[in-house]
Image (cartoon, helix red, strand yellow):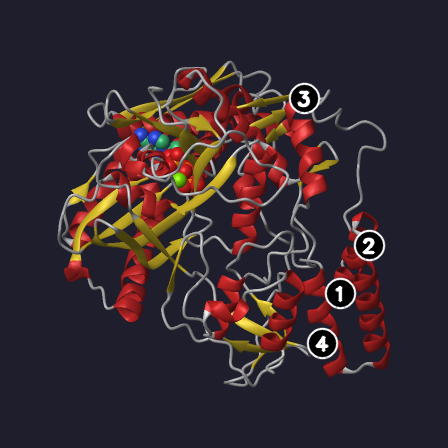
Amino acid sequence: MKHLQTGEVKAIQLDRGLDAIVEKKRMELAEILATGNVGATGGPGAATAPAPPQDNVSALLNRARQLLPNMPQPQRTEVENAIRQLETARSNNNPNEMGAALVNLTMLLM
Amino acid sequence: MATYHKVIGIDLGTTYSVVAAYNFEKQDVMVIPNRQNEHTTPSVVYINPSGEISVGRSAKEKQQRDPEGVLIEVKRLMGEQDEAGVKKMVVVRNKQYHPELISACILKELKACAERMIGEPVHDAVITVPAYFKESQKNATREAAKIAKLNPRLINEPTAAAVAYGLDSDEVQSFIVYDFGGGTFDVSIVRIENENTVEVVGIGGDANLGGGDIDEMLTQWFFGKMQAQYGSDFSNDKRLRGKARLEAEKVKINLCNDSETKVQEFVIANPVEGIEEACFSISLEEFERIIQDTLEKTLVQVQVALDSAQKNHEVTLEDVEAIILVGGSSKIPAVAKQLQARFNKPIKSNLNPDEIVAIGAARMAKNYEPSQAAVIKDDEELKPAEGVAAIGGGELDSTNIKDVVSHTLGIGLYGDLYDPLSLRTKSSRVGSVAMGIRLPRTTRPAFILLFIRAKTRRHPLISTSAKWLSAACGLSQRAFTGSKSRLRSMAMACFTGR
Ligand SMILES: Nc1ncnc2c1ncn2[C@@H]1O[C@H](COP(=O)(O)OP(=O)(O)OP(=O)(O)O)[C@@H](O)[C@H]1O
Ligand SMILES: [Mg+2]
């Protein structure tokens, strides 16, 4: 990231909170914990591959798509539009459009 | 009326955890013993091959027999990513677990101990976190609590330590809180303004320095002795390493507790096939020589914290009343000696350094009303108790805690530009948002780089909360009332500088 006031460039790891546990996952984990058993370890196929690294915009898009099926109707359409807006902005490579689209989608997902 | 206040205090440490609650009859906080009747519980989780969980000492002892299934120091993984930006997970026998789940195992165990003692279900806890924790780390801690069916309220560890010592003076007092734990070393300068306001004004420390490193040094020392005696290097033997680490900790604690004896034996039966017993003796002097460099590092960090307190809040060593010792490793006799010599301040260690953080958390917990149930479905925060005076009375009922904002806040602009916010004040009140942040109206942020979190549902980055927006934009809160969609468009306007 480039510091706007000093011009200094620094590697800052952005945290958009995308790793946070969502409600559904939390409920699932709470249930697992309540049983006191997290399932057999080390069996064949127990290994789960680590998620591939994503760029932040894709991560936001993926998350939006992930949440989409459980959204009530008016919000769902709004989010679908915002996803399209962001995709278009990205393919046009337009920073201004993209900034607005990012804010829009992020806000809608709150 | 129940004997215990049903909001408990938990010190969720890297290596040991402690739970405490306020007892109305004794009018004091009591540390709650675990199933082994001990006051501290190892923050260790063991998962056996069929997936069953155990927590605490029994889990820790599995290090000798089945080190693969033993999970230590999960606190270090909470809310963290690796260099590639992938969430850090706990791996046991090739299976991955969310760190939040493992941490929840520990919390569930502590909660169970508290419920046994209190005789009623417990739904709320004040949980302590290091002062340097980022928002993602705090968030992961909150999630762990919810998974364990506890409504969380987080406070800083050094703040809790200062609160444990009570707020019995009318004057502004500052303390150095020296917390040398199992996995980390943290030093904080805490200022108590009056009975209502406790504030962390400076921090220093080393996230990778703790009693575990000291155990590791002793383990190395042991393998050195083994090599000298038997002519080969056994340090790659995982089981022997596990055994030696456990023995190292025992020897260390005995040396420190029993300074009369001065010499301890480091004994391991059947270290390797063909050797019946390995036994080497070590003196307190030799031990202190081994760890001297480590101690020196902590003293340097005390100065770092003092410098930051001076720079940001004009609090100097002169203002410091005393040094509060926190954490098991601060019981090493050389610690108090050297702190005293270097900084020439009285040392407060009459409360057990292992328990003081949990005690402070339980004192704070008295300010919160117990809930009917744990809310794990939604993001309702624990509410301050109404009419707390009726419950307990006492000096802490209206304590206001301010925390340092430990990381830079800024606005991220699209295209990897970053505009740090200038903060009017460096501290924010717990449970609300940093006050006095102003977004430059001319910038067009794509998102807000935020380590403080307002009350958001799912996304911890930015919020449509009226309170947050008004703080962020320096406008009156009334400007932001209205429907959710109106709030959203107001937020948009603010964020895009219109
Ligand atoms: N009497 C003692 N003398 C020396 N070291 C001790 C003594 N008692 C406990 N310890 C050490 O203190 C450490 C645990 O301290 P504590 O319980 O404060 O850590 P923690 O809170 O889990 O860690 P952290 O603060 O890093 O999160 C362990 O390394 C333990 O061996
Ligand atoms: Mg600690």
Decide: is B489 above or below B119: below
Front residue (pair B87, B135): B135
* Chain on which label 1 sits: A
Q: Which mark, residue A35? A: 3
Amino acid type of the residue that numbered disc 4 sits on in the rendered structure? Ala
SS of the residue at dot 4? helix
Instruction: Please provide percent x and percent y for residue B70.
Output: 60, 28
Label 3 marks which chain's residue? A
- Asked if A82 appears above or below B398 in the picture, the reply is below
Instruction: Give the secondary structure at mark 2.
Output: helix
**What x and y, as percent, mark residue B12?**
46, 37
Give the number of the mark in front: 3 or 1: 3
Residue occupying the point 68% across, 43% down: A23
Q: Quadrant of ligand 1?
A: top left
Visible residue check, residue B203: yes
Residue identified by numbered label 2: A73
Q: Earlier in the sequence, mark 3 or mark 1?
A: 3
